[in-house]
Image (cartoon, helix red, strand yellow):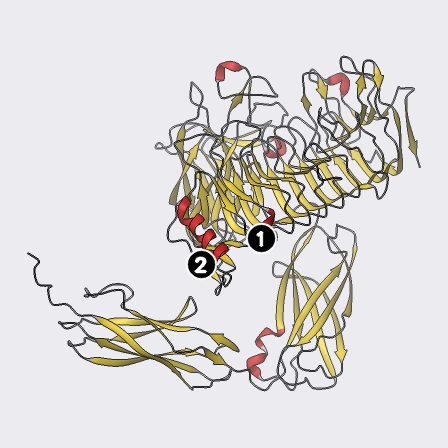
Amino acid sequence: MLGVPAPNPDLTLSGVSWTPTAPVETDPITVRATVHNGGTAGSGATDVNFYLGDTKVGTAAVGALAAGASTTVSASIGTRDAGSYTLSAKVDEANTVIEQNDGNNTANAPGPLVVTPVASSDLVAAAVNWAPGNPSAGNSVSFSVSLKNQGSVASASGTHGITLTVLNGSSVVTTLTGSYNGSIAAGATTPAVALGNWTAANGRYTVRVVLADDANELPVKRTNNTSERPFFVGRGASMPYDHLEAEDAAVGGGATVIGPNRTIGDLAGEASGRRAVTLNSNGAYVEFTTRAATNTLVTRFSIPDSAGGGGQSSTLSVYVNGAFAKTLPLTSKYAWLYGAEASPNNSPGSGPARHIYDEANLMLDQTYPAGTKIRLQKDPANGTTYSIDFVDTEAAVVVPNPGAGFVTPSGFTQQDVQNALDQVRQDSSLQGVYLPPGDYQTSSKFQVYGKAVKVVGAGPWFTRFHAPDTQDNTDIGFRSEASANGSTFSGFAYFGNYTSRIDGPGKVFDFSNTANMTIDNVWVEHMVCLYWGSNTDTSTIRNSRIRDTFADGINMTNGSAGNTVSNNEARSTGDDSFALFNATDNGGGEVRDNVFENLSATLTWRAAGFAVYGGTNNVFRNLYAADMLTYPGITISSLDFGIPMNGFGATPPTQFQNVSVVRSGGHFWGNQAFGAVWVFSASKIFQGIRVSDLDIVDPTYSGIMFQTNYVNGSPQFPVADTVFTNTTITGAHKSGDAFDAKSGFAIWANELPEPGQGPATGEATFTNLTLTNLTLTNNTTDIQNTTTTFTLHRN
């Protein structure tokens, strides 16, 4: 027999409205709603929250209500920008009142809240441009600004002043001024106004534009007359975090700065800059002083493997400004490989170790300003030894829900996310899935098909996919079909569970025969690859971070054309960090017309930072490669690896522009010693190569090595139509190790063949080649070419 329900209140809402009923942008708006207690008992005090879309804009207190009573409450939400808003109210959202029914606590206004623009001009900097768009130090950068009147009336006539300031932090680097003369109609945009030039220097800057107030512009419309944009000068990626090396930080308590050396499997040799800090005794610490605000911490570290392999877990203490803040969890599960260099495994008995570092990340409890001291310290509770390579600090901010047309998963499971993707696919009124902050458990690939879909996370610090921690080598990520061409994937992280290389699975984005895809602001660790594209066209991968993979970071092949890979950083990849491979085994035609720009590749533990294997009119520019452990910073090769492949097209040529290669080159495949740049003519035609503004610093064995592949004692294709312009090579010294005879050359036409091989063949031309200077970084030998088969032309 069922009992009688206990008396309880039941709060409902009605009459959601606003005043004034037809507001303009300058009108303060008041929102209101009527709360009714339709239950059988009185209600205690609570509140009503008001929302515009998904954004809470106000709260009103609700006093105690007797059963059957009603009250109207209101809240001021200030002025609002012109637009159309969905107004809703939610009573007792915190569930402080026990009710008969919590499902009826929300109500919407009967129609949109429409805010009308005031009669005013509204001038903004519509376009702030600089040329070149990706400058390097020493370039003369020209700046221009276009003005737009996004108001409802024309601007005043006369002069509209423009001031552009380049800032380094709070310091003014340069100030440029200009003006536009004449009235600007409502909705119109002016031609670009040239403001002048600045000689660029490496660094991260802010470009601030201030527009003079217009006489027809009401004060409420002047807040956007000042705007700012980030501006980066240099080679490599401009990422949102600040990088601090441990060897440059303060150390104490018995901490030791180690290195430099270039030994694989060594704590210094596998660290960035080939130096690190060890914390081997209680009280040992390394302390970093932040240069920018941060609420996060990333640490590259090494702790010992377990005795039988497979890793161990530990912790490290984090102090902020001298006070204990948090414990940083660490594991060596994803590091420490052993044995054969080309196919290492997780068993310590297999041979020498390599890939001994990993990264850990931590969200701090608050945002700390520049100048904060963050200390990593071994305390008695931290039960092992530690090597610290560097930290990254970043002020991470949640990306909000884009709003109308986006659904959110009902939970954080694999099926919850797939259900949301399917809902979008089946509903023509929906455009995407928003993934709110949370840890998402994923065990397989998400399937995207049927139409273009936007998958938007709250940012990679907040929306995080995790492979099962009870498994190894789980194939997770996204697979998309051509029916979803035009899809976007942004603002999330993927933390895999790969502990060894498995060719085939393990690519977060495993795309084939797709086009017009965008991957933006994605963070990937412990996978095989971030992206593998076969015949993928006109797509963009940008602003992403790739760390500790077991193969390539990004590889495009089989006819991939017209793609842009821009502003990404790869650290510690297990194959080429960024690669183009002109294979034809899966169809697709020529790999051509791709742009790889503003990229950083560091600490690659197998293969190169940047690699191109054939193709036509592919451009690599503004690149930074450092601390390659076994291979060159750049590989330019026509080797087919036994796979059907085309070589290099003659025109338009393959181009490398504005490149720095630092502390790179290494040994692999037994006795092969690679230069910082490897030019390898092999099984397909080698031609149409243009390299300009290349700086090679402190190579491990040689600066540029030319090599030719031989089959049955005969060379394959020679190096042809290859031109280097504005090349500087310094610090090519004798290595003093087992490969000393193959070291110390700035430029080397390899005459020391590997077994079954022979000397380099062909020719290359250098214009404006710099090989010596007045410092101690002179090369042991500038040019080593004892062959009769290779010719170096120097202009």
**Quadrant assignment, res 70:** bottom left
Dot 1 amino acid type: Ser
Percent of width and height locating residue 616:
79, 41
Residue 407, label in figure: 2
Residue pictured at 86% horizontal, 42% vertical: 651
Q: Front-most of 607 and 465?
A: 465
Mark nearer the N terminus (2 vs 1): 2
Q: Residues within 10 Å of mark 2 (few under 14, many from 20)?
A: many
Mark 1, secondary structure of its residue: loop
Percent of width and height locating residue 80:
48, 77
Q: Is residue 58 left or right of residue 772?
A: left
Q: Residues within 10 Å of mark 1 (few under 14, many from 20)?
A: many
Question: Which residue lies under the disc numbered 1?
Answer: 487
Residue pictured at 55% horizontal, 33% vertical: 528
Residue pictured at 46% horizontal, 50% vertical: 463
User: In this rendering, does residue 293 appear at all?
Assistant: no
Question: How many angstroms separate mark 2 from mark 1 (CA)?
Answer: 15 Å
Mark 2, secondary structure of its residue: strand
Q: Front-most of 379 and 112?
A: 112
**Quadrant assignment, res 660:** top right
Percent of width and height locating residue 312:
41, 27
